Image (cartoon, rainbow, N blue to C red):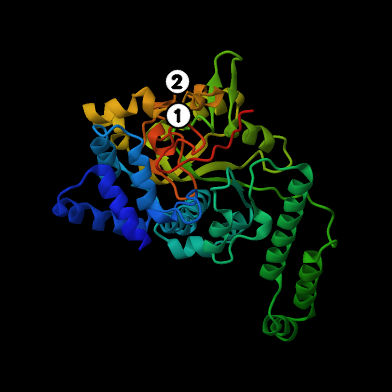
Amino acid sequence: MKDQNAQSLLARVMDWQDEDVVRKYVPILQLLADYKYDQYQRFGPGKRFIESLALWLQQFDASDRPAAFDLVMSKLVYFSDAELSHLVQHAYPDVIVQERMRLVAEEKDIPPHCVGEIARHPRFKELRLKSLYLGLSDGARTNELRRAGQGEISNEQIWQAYELGDSKAEEMLEELQKSLTEDEHERKLPTAEEFWRLHDGEGRVAADKALAGIIESLPGAKPTAPKPKFNLIWLLDDFSGSGNTYIRFDGKSGRYKGKIKKIFERLHQGDLIDPSHYEVYLLLYIATRQAIDHIEYWSERFTSENGYKPLQIRVLCPIEREAALTHDLSPSLKAILENPKYYDKHASDKHIKVGGTDDANYGFANCALPVVLPHNTPNNSVYVLWGPESYGFYGLFPRVSRHREF
C-alpha cells in the first residue's frame, strides 16, 4: 500500500495522465529502488526512494520536472553496497598480490610467467608480512579487505586511519618482528626425519650443526638485529572525485597540503619503513579520471621535490570524463543546475572554495558528477543530488557533510 501511495504521488507530481506513461516508468523505478536506491543509508526511517523522488521533484517548477526526472533516469550513476563490496573483494587478489608478485619477479630475476616459482619464493611471503594497510576514510572498508585476504592480512598490519601514533606504530613493528621470526624459524627447523638422517647417516658433526642452527634461530640466541620495518604501504579509500583531498598545492602559503603529504612525512620519520626499499600505493576502489590525473601530477611534483619515492596509484573502477554532466549538457539540464531557486547559498562554504569555485552547483571542483555512493553522496556530484535536508533546496540523495559550520 505504501508503494502504491508513493507511486500515485509521483504520477501526480509529474502530471502523468496517461496510464501508458505510468506503466512505462514506474516498474523501472521500482526495480531500481528494490535493487539499489532504497538502500541509500541517508534515507530516514520509513522513507525510501520512490517517495523521496516524488518529494524532490515537487521542489522544481512544473516545467523543469521533466529535465530533473531525465537526470535520474538516464544520467544517475549509483554504486550499491554490494557493488562496492565486490570491488573490495577483488582488490587483494587482483591488485595487491599481483604487485607483490611483480616486485619479487624483478628483485629475484624470475620470469613473470613463472607464477608458482614466485609464490614459493621466501621473499614473496616476507613482502606479505612487511605490508602495511592504512584506511584514508571511513569508506576504506579495511575490515572487508582483511577478510578478502583469506587470512593473509593480520590485524596488526591494518589500521583504520592514516594518522598513526608512535605507540601504535611501535606495536605494529613488534608484531612484524614476531611474524618474521616465526617464519624464519619454520623455514630453518628440520623435520624429525631430516634430523635423524643427519645423525645416523652423516655423523654427529652434521647433527650438531643442525642443532646449532635451531638454537641460533631461537629468540634471544643471537645479538639483537635491527628491527624489521615495512616495505609496502597500501593507502586505501573508496572514492575520489577531484583528488584535492589527497594532494594539492596552496598558492597562498606556497605549501603542499592533503593526506598524501601527511602520510609521506609520517613514513619518513624513519620508524615505520625501510628507507632503502619501500613502495607507497594509493589504492582507490572508484576514482574519476580527473582525480587520477590530478593526484598523479601533484604527487609526482611533491615526491620529487622532497626526495621521496613516487606514489603509485591503482584504481579498480575508473570513471571517465564522459560521465560528467558537462560533457554533453542539454539546455534543459543546464537550466536547472544553474537556477538559484534550486540551490542553497549555505553550500557555498570555505570547503567548497578549496576546489576553486565559489559555489557547488556543479559540485566540488566543478566535477559535475551524477554519482551516488551507498553511504553518502560525494560533494563532487551536482548540488541538486546531494543538498542536505536542512537546506532550503535538498537533494534526492541528501548528503551528510564531514565538515560542520557553526
Which image quarter holds the N terminus? bottom left
Q: Residue drawn at (60%, 27%), measured in percent from left and top? A: 307
Q: Position of residue 60 (x, y in %)?
A: 32, 34
Residue occupied by mark 1: 364
Q: Are marks 2 and 1 in contact (CB under 8 Å)?
A: yes
Instruction: Identify whether 250 is placed above or below 23.
Output: above
Residue 287, image quadrant = top left
Q: Is residue 111 visible?
A: no
Residue 382, image quadrant = top left
Which amino acid, mark 1? Phe
Residue occupied by mark 2: 357
Instruction: Identify whether 52 is placed above or below 356.
Output: below
Q: Position of residue 242 (x, y in %)?
A: 45, 32
Q: Secondary structure at mark 2?
A: loop
Which amino acid, mark 2? Thr
Q: Residue drawn at (32%, 43%), measured in percent from left and top? A: 76
Which image quarter holds the C terminus? top right
Q: Residue drawn at (34%, 54%), measured in percent from left and top? A: 6
Which disc is residue 46 wearing? Answer: none
Left or right of 309 in this view: 3: left
Q: Position of residue 112 (x, y in %)?
A: 42, 55
> Which numbered disc, 2 or 1, marks the residue that appears first in the sequence?
2
Q: Residues within 10 Å of mark 1 (few under 14, many from 20)?
A: many
